[in-house]
Image (spheres, grey):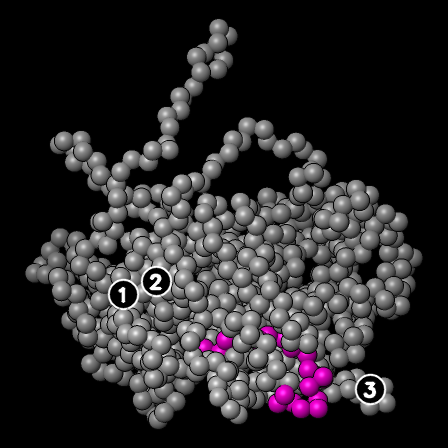
Amino acid sequence: MGAPTYPGTRHPLAPLSDAEFRKARDLVLSAHGAHHSALFFRAIQLEEPRKADLIPFLIAEHAGEEMSGFTDRPPRLARVQYDVVTPGKQGSASVFRYTQSVVDLDTSVEISRDEAPDDCHPAYVMSEFAQLQDICLASPHFQDALSEFVIPPHFSIVIDPWPYGGIEETDPSTRYMQGMVFARDDSAAHPDSNHYGYPIPIIPVVEWATKKIIRIDRLATSVSPGTIFAPNRKPSAPPVDIFVGRKPAEYLPELLDRPLREDVKPIDITQPHGPSFTVHDDNLVEWQKWRFRLGFTAREGAVLHDLTYDHRPVLYRLSYSELAIPYADPRYPFHRKQAFDLGDGGVGRAVNNLELGCDCLGAIHYFNTTFPEADGSPTLSKAVVCLHEQDNGICWKHTNFRTGRAVVARLRELVVQFVATLANYDYVFAFKLDVAGGITIETRATGVMSVVAIDPAAKSCQYGAIVAPGVLAQNHQHVFAVRIDPAIDSYAPEDNVVIQEETVPRDIDPVTNPSGNLYAIERRAIRESAGLFAEPRANRVFRLEHATKRNAVSGRRVGYMFVPDAKQLLLAPPGSMQAKRAGFAGRHVWVTGYRDGEHWAAGEFTNQSKAEVGGVVDMVARGDILADEEGGGGEGNGNGTNGTGTGTGTGNGKGKGERCGPVVWGIFGLTHNPRMEDWPVMPVEIHQMRLRPADFFTSNPALDMPSGRNGASVLVGCCEAKKPNGRV
């Protein structure tokens, strides 16, 4: 093939350059030869090196070695995801074969190509979602369905694309997309007028190969039992005026029916000397002893690689893995309202282009990314991730009550944030690093609730909240998964173990606990892959520890403590479609054995899935061994034992019973039973998971934070003098 075009000068974790992006596309086109014109590109992004290949490079890099001559540099690889389109014969539908190729950019070789099975469907790209409305509006079938309703002349039709959340047993293995239909009041001549206040009770179903509507489901609007309608039901009654009694549900400032507050004075975040972080080439970020490389994928959004503190590794990789949103309305066809926002579409694809002074405040650095057009040509998407610092209150403080001397340090955080809009909902995803060595994974849900039409005379509904006449916001859940790949003071997989730690009471004993005030810390090594629950009554935490390295002062193993979010998990019962498709949502914590490329809590293919395949449930079923007998965590155990369980399994894909490095999956959720305050746009619902150093340091790592006064703070009087009438 000739001399390598890319001699390995870019870091193995750096995002693809524009030249590499184009080269990856060209290599795939060339590999398909004369059929290259029939490719539909979905994603082109860095293929991360195998962990075993990358670890020696990272060790040498952190040791300060000269990397330009490093002989074991992992190759620069790219993963290209695309459809091979075969035109149908004699008017039949085209065939789309989802394919993934991995190409070596150094040697210009396609090194692997995998075709998905017929019943595995890829995530939709934004251009496909955008086509749904035009397909429906051009369909006589759809126009005929609209004629069943009285639509005022100053209204236009708006259709939200939705994944087809779980196929029927009678459906063939082909791609579908469904649409939620609304009307927008155009009397204000404003394109952003809120259409969610006017739902229309039909759902068109489009077969994606032909781009044609195969049926239109009529939705139940009655709340009484027995109104679970069959598909394609068409009422024989005359057109129904479904907008009777409705009024606009606007949120835009210029369209509100109330004045904006006039007593809100600006709060400016100023950094006159600039930020404390530094962003280098290849997306390397350094801030307050923290160091990491920022990646970005179409499915996950922002990814943190090689996260270290003061030159000590903490995490190999940190990312969001999945978000399942099942709705709780049993009437047909709302069982299909179960979106997997990462697997069905991708939060990276749905990312916002952030605006200065709006989404992030202060001194901001923005990161861009590149997406492929259908033909594989690159399109730059600007400002998809913002990086900024923020003050989160007091970090530590003590006042000497004898002298009155107080010393206080602020808890400054570095925030890596991106925002994704999935039709009606908006999600704010953030990774926060702080000066005390802590990591916070934060999600904020906002946007507009997904609503459906209901009988305007209805006053209540067991399936949700009536937020306006004729408008029902259905009960639903949001279940998130975060993937945590630890590297606690070592990149070696065998050096990382997971310990379940609980704080439990001890019975009164005349010798050991005569007053009954003793409690004990019990530790159990997670020796075999498992799914586990949070247990706040036992203060259950999971310590990610180095297997042998101990703190020089405490004598305990160095580590980080993961506190799971003890929120409600998936409510759908076992055997239900929703539960079978989202097995990951049944536990708060999963601990599995590491495999390269195994990033998806619900499996790789969620779009129209019938069951979770290749997700954490299957990973646990392998029985991977995560710690040997000596790797248990007995120190500090109230009963002096070294934990329980030995386990058997397939190891790390090399041989039966061989040890794997652990991966921790944190599951947390929001059970959203709508309230009036969530309409027409909901205030953020904030959820956090935390990783905190636990014997990783020999003292408070934020002791060296400056504690001087903030010179920009000013004194404000508490009140004005009382007026003669006694009023203020």
Residue at mark 1:
311
Q: In which quarter of the image is residue 258?
A: top right
How far apart are the two marked residues, 1 and 3, measured between alpha carbons? 60 Å
Q: What element carries label 1?
A: loop
Identify the residue shown where x is 18% and y is 33%: 405
The 10 Å Cα crowd at callout 2, few under 14, some 14 to 19, many 20 or more, is many
How far apart are the two marked residues, 2 and 1, measured between alpha carbons? 8 Å
Q: Is mark 3 on a helix, strand or loop?
A: loop
Q: In this view, does 367 lie to the left or right of 609?
A: left
Name of the residue lying farthest toward the left:
511
Question: Eyeballing the image, is 695 above or below 449?
Answer: below
Q: Is residue 572 visible?
A: no
Relative depth, front residue between 531 and 630: 630
Q: Where does the image place residue 191, in percent across and percent down from the top left?
A: 75, 49
The 10 Å Cα crowd at callout 3, few under 14, some 14 to 19, many 20 or more, is few
Q: Which amino acid does label 2 sit on?
A: Arg
How far apart are the two marked residues, 3 and 2, measured between alpha carbons? 55 Å
Whichever of labels 2 and 1 marks the residue nearer the N terminus, that label is 2
Relative depth, front residue between 76 and 136: 76
Q: Is residue 384 visible?
A: yes
Q: What element carries label 2?
A: strand
Q: What residue type is labelled 3?
A: Ser
Whichever of labels 3 and 2 marks the residue nearer the N terminus, that label is 3
Residue at mark 3:
92
Magenta part of the protein: which range? 30-48
Residue at mark 2:
291
Name of the residue lying farthest toward the right:
238
Q: Which amino acid does label 1 sit on?
A: His
CB-based contact (under 8 Å), mark 2 and mark 1: yes
